[in-house]
Amino acid sequence: MKRDVHVVIDETLCTGCGACVDICPHDTLTLADGKATVTGDDSLSCGHCLAVCPTHAITLTGYRPMHLGYQTFETPKGWLSPGAFDVGTLVQLMASRRSCRHYTPDPVPMQVLEDLVKIGTTAPSGTNAQLWNFTLLPDRPSVEGFAEGILSFFKKLNRLARIAPLRGLLKVLGKPELSAYYTDYHDRIEEGIASWETLRWDRLFHGAPAAILVSCARDASCPAEDALLASNQILLAAHAMGLGTCLVGFAVEALSNDKNLRNLAQLPADETVYAVIAIGHPDEPYRRPSVRKPITPRVVNIGRVP
């Protein structure tokens, strides 16, 4: 996919050091008459040239610096070089983030949600396409309305799953998904629907006052990876802000199969939602990080000469 060039070079500031030319992954720049020059007609707009320039001679039109423009906090100036941040503190943050299933009724300010979206876009994306998008459900009524749409989908699915001949026929035809759903999820979903309708007990969003839907255009080179990497940035940043989060997988499944729910969320036809994040102020008494299964990575020595 050919993309426009947004690189602008100020010749009065350029010293001709060639650093931008050497680091450009797309051969967009060359040195001419002792100055960096845009000679290619295609660019990833990755900003490597801007980041490496010692004299601030390079800008990218239509783009904003990743570390600027936040409304609820300020970031230190400058770039953290590899090794310049304490890895122990980083791991402590990652290990301390937990899925939150109890929230206070306090709202999440719109400015905070908008900042979390901007933080999400600090994630890498395949070929720097940045074709992700973020849909905000900014208050509890919006979350409840969305939850109603999800439950409507699962009511229909449960009615189908209870038809034993249909499950059997599909299984014979090599489509065992409905049978597996009936075994693994039907009863749990039925309980959740009853809890919502009789007690208003929210087993989907757990009372969260806001949510973020993370989607990506289907023609992106790595749409799922792009959206999920951005989602993880949001999860970690939310914890640092004092907020709790929880990924709602049932919402993603419903959005993948229900056009009415997609219309309710006003999603464009060319986008797929890969993560739905419940978010709010946590009301949980965690005191320490949890645990993970031990893992031994596979070591593969490819091409090693004995």
Image (spheres, helix red, strand yellow):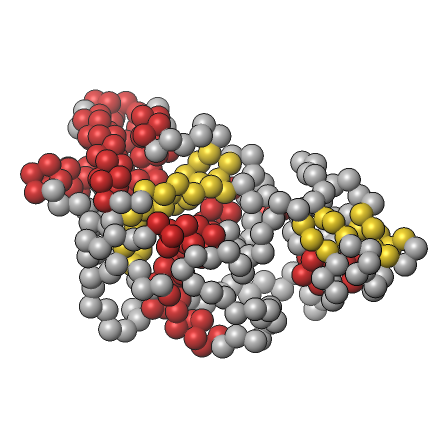
Q: Residue at x 68, y 38 (%)?
A: 3
Is residue 204 toward the left or the right of residue 272 in the image? left
Residue 93, percent from left and from top: 39, 69
The image quadrant that residue 36 belongs to is bottom right
- Is 63 above or below relative to 163? below
Is residue 14 toward the left or the right of residue 222 in the image? right
The image quadrant that residue 169 belongs to is top left
Residue at the limit of the structure toward the left, as seen here: 198
Residue 231 visible in the picture: no
Residue 99, percent from left and from top: 29, 58
Q: Residue at x 65, y 51 (%)?
A: 46
Quarter of the picture containing the C terminus is bottom right
| Nearest the eye: 190 or 233 | 233
Is residue 242 toward the left or the right of residue 67 in the image? left
Residue 154, percent from left and from top: 23, 33
Residue 260, percent from left and from top: 31, 26
Q: Residue at x 60, y 69 (%)?
A: 78
- Is 257 above or below relative to 73? above
Residue at the limit of the structure toward the right, as seen here: 33
- Is 116 above or below relative to 153? below
The image quadrant that residue 182 belongs to is top left
Residue 166 visible in the picture: yes
Q: Residue at x 31, y 34 (%)?
A: 254
